[in-house]
Amino acid sequence: MNFLSDTTAPAHPKLLEALTAANAGFAMSYGADDISARVETRLKEIFETDLRVLFTVSGTAANALTLATLCPGHGAILCHDEAHIHRDERGAPEFYTGGAKLIPLRGAHAKISLDELDRALDEIPEGFVHTSPVRTLSLSNLTESGTAYTVSEVTERAGRLKDRPAFVHMDGARFTNALVSLGCSPAELTWKAGVDALCFGATKNAAMGSEAIILFPSVLDRFEELQMRQKRGGHMAPKMRYLAAQFDAWLADDLWLDLAGTANRQARRLAVGLAATDGVEILHDVDGNEIFATIPADVAEHMRAAGVQFYQWPDGSARLVTSWCTSDNEIDAALKAIRRDLKL
């Protein structure tokens, strides 16, 4: 009953099989292989537009390299105060951008509020030499509270930048979970809503370790700079085919969507059981595969004693995360540990 994180889950067998298949013979290095080209073609079909893609082994690398490509060192990046780039990446975005300023904003359920965004933009006028000009807005989808920005919410926030030379970055470590929950198309949730670059995560959804940086048409002219930064930053894998192979298998036959769907369904089922327990409060909508809840100390102790593993969030709440391989038996056992008399 491991609900610590989806990064603790194993890789899907089909992705491991793809790695074995990719290991046959020789292939061009640094992303010039046939598998990488095939994945890029598939992503163009999925997102219904022209695009360029590079692969990295971690979400932090993907975010930092993308932000460095979009935002100069003298610029500012607006993000939520709970954003991964602000709280959990040890200054990597600032390091790779060469000093760009992250400006954290507030908003319920880890979504940047429009009022906060408007306030920040009003306080940072263009052409004022004493402030760092806003050059990027970063949105996490899913957010760090497990909630999803809807298409209209992304569009509204991206639209606030239309009069500035600024871009929109989306941290999509759990993008697929958000997509499945919302029921929209990948295009609708990204470039059609005003997103310029997406860090498309597979690691949290059954990959061994592979993330895709996707540049949409509005920033295709920055692809060479992204490549340069990837190489200079030490994140250009020589045998890129192994990263691409994971995406190749993951995207085939909508496996990526099916896996996220399983994780989402199990999270909702677990959340229902938690919500039915006296003293437990679900803090945010469960729009994907993450649950945040306040759990009484005696209930939490009983859960841990029964083998239910979860993460204690800094604010004192509990975070429980399901994955592509969370089974019905695990959910049943966890719910029994929460309430012995729960009707399953």
Image: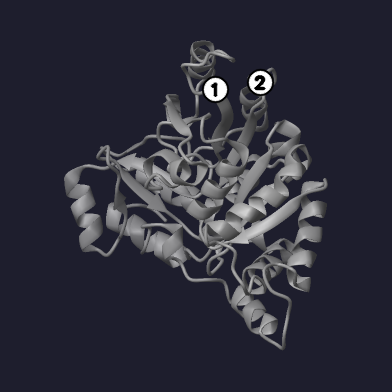
* Relative to 21, residue 258 above or below: above
Q: Given contact means CB atoms under 8 Å apart, are the residues at marks 2 and 1 in contact?
A: yes
- Can you give x and y, in whole percent of width and height, for residue 192 in the image? 76, 34
Q: Residue at x 69, y 38 (%)?
A: 196
Task: Rate crowding at label 2 as few (under 14), some (14 to 19) or many (20 or more) other CA atoms within 10 Å.
Answer: some
Q: Is 339 or 245 nearer to us in this picture?
A: 245
- Residue 164: mark in rendering: 2
Amino acid carrying mark 1 in the image: Pro
Amino acid carrying mark 2 in the image: Arg
In this view, the residue farthest toward the front is 129
> Callout 1: helix, strand or loop?
loop
Q: Is residue 261 left or right of residue 344?
A: right
Q: Residue at x 26, y 43 (%)?
A: 295
* Relative to 162, residue 296 above or below: below
> Callout 2: helix, strand or loop?
loop
Q: Residue at x 45, y 24 (%)?
A: 107
- Can you give x and y, in whole percent of width and height, for residue 128 in the image? 53, 13
- Can you give x and y, in whole percent of width and height, for residue 140 in the image? 53, 39
The quarter of the rendered structure image containing the C terminus is: bottom left
Q: Is residue 232 left or right of residue 21?
A: left
